Image: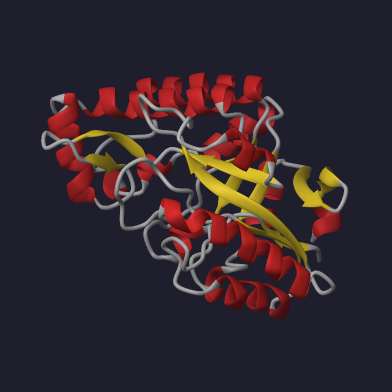
């Protein structure tokens, strides 16, 4: 088995373990390829992204870790960069991005509360409900369609190597609290988004992070979305979105088996030679 994970976090952002602890765990769990992708700074105060004044030391620490452990595991330097409505990804210097091995692009923030504070789709149900009420007049459909528009715009503008947790907005939707994924408008929003992703060329991750932390009972994205991506040949990889050492390889094999069951034959791996297609049977 060839194990890998390109979506991981550290104490530089909202991760629980240090960079060194995460890499040592990856080695212990037998990973061959490991990417470090802490949340990049955003242009306003948060308690979960990397502070701007820590970015330089973060990049230096990845280089140090690469030097220390590079003979035991292939380590890649990345960032998870937020695409923010009205800002895009302009808050991150292009020179920084060009110095990375890869980037994960994600949409967390959707709009502002009445008090001017930006809110995210993945904090909890109460925040999402309040945000929809204050920013979209309580119109859930409008909010969800705007979310997927932002994801699609990110795919075309930022063109991240990996597109993170595509349907993150479902995180607080257990019991169809906000919407039903079978509704035509929701399916249409997804399909429009997938068209932009296909055009932009990003790799979409199948992400076990929601399950690992007890937020969801399934992966991001939902099975039916994975099936639609297979139909239009959108490349995929699997990742842990790991915030703890325990999550470094969470359900790695199960994610690959899920992809194979749904008809996916290949996944993307970042190797010493760059991004490569690999047959799932060879990975397993």
Q: Which x, y percent locates residue 20?
A: 61, 75
Q: Which x, y percent locates residue 146?
A: 34, 24
Q: Measuring 36% from the left and 48% from the top, which residue is drawn there?
A: 171
Occupied quadrant, residue 215: bottom left
The residue nearer to you, when weighing 8 against 199, is 8
Q: In the shown orientation, is residue 198 left or right of residue 107?
A: right
Q: Measuring 68% from the left and 31% from the top, which residue is drawn there?
A: 234
Whether residue 260 is visible:
yes
Q: In the shown orientation, is residue 236 left or right of residue 86?
A: right
Q: Measuring 39% from the left and 33% from the top, which residue is drawn there?
A: 84
Quarter that holds the C terminus: bottom right
Q: Which x, y percent locates residue 82?
A: 45, 40
Occupied quadrant, residue 276: top right
The residue nearer to you, when weighing 11 against 210, is 11
Q: Which x, y percent locates residue 51?
A: 40, 55
Quarter that holds the N terminus: bottom right
Q: Measuring 20% from the left and 40% from the top, which residue is drawn there?
A: 117
* Rendering colour mode: secondary structure
Occupied quadrant, residue 94: top right
Q: In the shown orientation, is residue 21 left or right of residue 278?
A: left
Q: In the shown orientation, is residue 150 left or right of residue 24?
A: left
Q: How many marks?
A: 0
Whether residue 183 is visible:
no
Q: Relative to 112, does residue 57 appear above or below in the rendering?
A: below
Q: Relative to 206, does residue 208 appear above or below in the rendering?
A: below
The residue nearer to you, when weighing 265 against 10, is 10
Q: Relative to 214, does residue 104 appear above or below in the rendering?
A: above
């Amino acid at each position: 088995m060839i194990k890998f994970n390109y979506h991981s976090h550290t104490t530089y952002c909202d991760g629980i373990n240090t960079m060194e602890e995460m890499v040592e765990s990856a080695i212990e769990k037998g990973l061959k390829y490991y990417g470090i992708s802490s949340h990049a700074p955003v242009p306003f105060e948060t308690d979960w992204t990397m502070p701007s004044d820590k970015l330089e030391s973060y990049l230096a620490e990845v280089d140090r870790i690469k030097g220390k452990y590079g003979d035991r595991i292939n380590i890649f330097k990345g960032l998870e960069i937020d695409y923010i409505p009205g800002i895009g990804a302009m808050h991150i210097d292009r020179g920084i991005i060009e110095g990375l091995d890869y980037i994960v692009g994600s949409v967390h923030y959707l709009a502002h509360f009445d008090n001017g504070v930006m809110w995210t789709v993945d904090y909890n149900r109460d925040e999402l409900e309040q945000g929809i009420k204050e920013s979209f007049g309580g119109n859930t459909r409008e909010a969800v369609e705007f979310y997927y528009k932002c994801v699609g715009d990110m795919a075309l503008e930022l063109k991240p190597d990996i597109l993170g947790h595509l349907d993150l907005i479902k995180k607080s939707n257990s019991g169809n609290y906000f919407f039903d994924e079978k509704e035509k408008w929701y399916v249409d929003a997804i399909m429009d988004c997938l068209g932009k992703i296909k055009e932009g060329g990003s790799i979409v991750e199948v992400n076990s992070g929601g399950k690992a932390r007890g937020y969801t009972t399934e992966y991001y994205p939902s099975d039916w979305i994975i099936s639609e991506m297979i139909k239009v040949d959108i490349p995929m990889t699997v990742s842990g979105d790991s915030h703890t050492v325990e999550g470094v390889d969470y359900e790695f094999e199960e994610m690959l088996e899920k992809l194979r069951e749904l008809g996916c034959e290949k996944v993307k791996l970042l190797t010493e030679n760059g991004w490569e297609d690999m047959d799932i049977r060879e990975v397993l």
